[in-house]
Amino acid sequence: METREPMPPFPTLADMLHTFLDLYEKDRVGVSVALESSPDYWLPEGMEYVSLRDQLKLILEASRRSQMEIRRKTLIETNSSFPRQRQLRELIDDPSKLKYYVGSTKPLEIARIFAEEQGVSVEQFIADDIREELAKEKVDVELLRFFADRLGSLVDAIDKLDETDFSLLVPEFLVAPFRELHVNAVLGNYGTALILCGALLEKALQDILLSDEQLNLLITQAKTKGFIRNHNLKFADRIRDDRNGVVHGSIPFGAISSDYAWDTITWTRKLISSLYQQRKNQEK
């Protein structure tokens, strides 16, 4: 009996995303043109085996189940938009827009092999394969949409950060909280980011002042000794108040906007930079 080589594993969504990013870095214009091609060239794929209406129904139901799974486990609302699926609906509502025909989503020679093994017709195998793939719960896709929706605002926020090289400034024990602060902000965890701003300032002041006091008293000591002065005075008080407000509930997590959180992060960065720059100058 003839033995066949096992099929190579399909790439994960992360693999494909990295491949897309490689292509985008090399030729963003070419990639943009390819993605803007008429939906007639790719949306109808498999239409001769599974109707467009059934395809849309399966996609939307799989997306709904993925959204429910994510919300049930994490309370994250993903409710993202599906621009290509909207085009698919338009094709269903107005078939006259469908001008081109595209074949199976799988190469026919591969489909014939699997169909033969399963004892079904090629057409039946392809139809079943399309339905199975479209009906899968795609949690990875939903999460990627969640972050994609926030990408523009995150890039804008990070672009606006100052150019200070904190790797040359802060001591090793501050690296982890400094990194976690920015990771949480990028993920949209703004309440956590405000808490970490306060924790980061407290740790820095304890280091600078050689003190184990808490943040409120540390700020007072730093003002008295001249480590915090001028416009940084209001920054320190604001960071403390934000941290306390979130921890004690007077600032609801849901009320913290992206702009507000990134403003506080910017102030925290300026204070940390100022404190450690002063110490470096004293050490010279």
Image (cartoon, grey):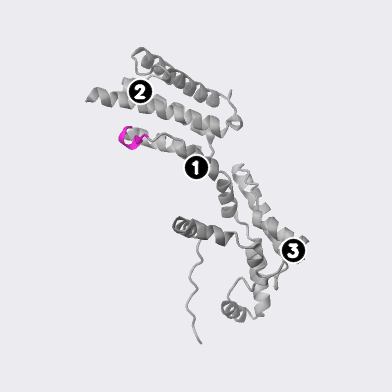
* Gap in angstroms between the C-alphas marked 1 and 2: 32 Å
- Which mark's residue is nearer the viewer, 1 or 2? 1
* Gap in angstroms between the C-alphas marked 3 and 1: 37 Å
Question: On residue 183, which mark appears?
Answer: none
At numbered mark 2, what does the secondary structure look like: helix, strand or loop?
helix
Report which residue position mark 2 lands on: 206
Name the spot of residue 190 as percent of width and height, x first. Answer: 53, 34
State whether residue 200 appears in this view: no
Report which residue position mark 1 lands on: 155
Residue at the image point whose x is 57% and y is 49% from the top: 143
Q: What residue type is labelled 1?
A: Val
Give the magenta-colored segment's residue range: 164-171
Residue in front for this viewpoint, 68 or 237: 237
Residue at the image point whose x is 55% and y is 46% from the top: 147
The answer to whether residue 178 is left or right of residue 1 is left
Residue 169 lies within the magenta run: yes
Name the spot of residue 10 as percent of width and height, x first. Answer: 51, 66
Residue at the image point whose x is 27% and y is 26% from the top: 280
Residue projecting furthest to the top: 224
The answer to whether residue 241 is left or right of residue 204 is right
Nearer the N terminus, badge 1 or badge 2?
A: 1
The answer to whether residue 70 is left or right of residue 244 is right
Name the spot of residue 172 as percent of width and height, x first. Answer: 32, 35
Name the spot of residue 159 as percent of width and height, x first. Answer: 46, 39
Give the quadrant of residue 53.
bottom right
Residue in front for this viewpoint, 273 or 12: 273
Secondary structure predominantly adopted by residues drawn in magenta: loop
Examine the rendered structure and indicate whether residue 274 appears above or below residue 65.
above
Report which residue position mark 3 lands on: 53
Q: What residue type is labelled 2?
A: Gln
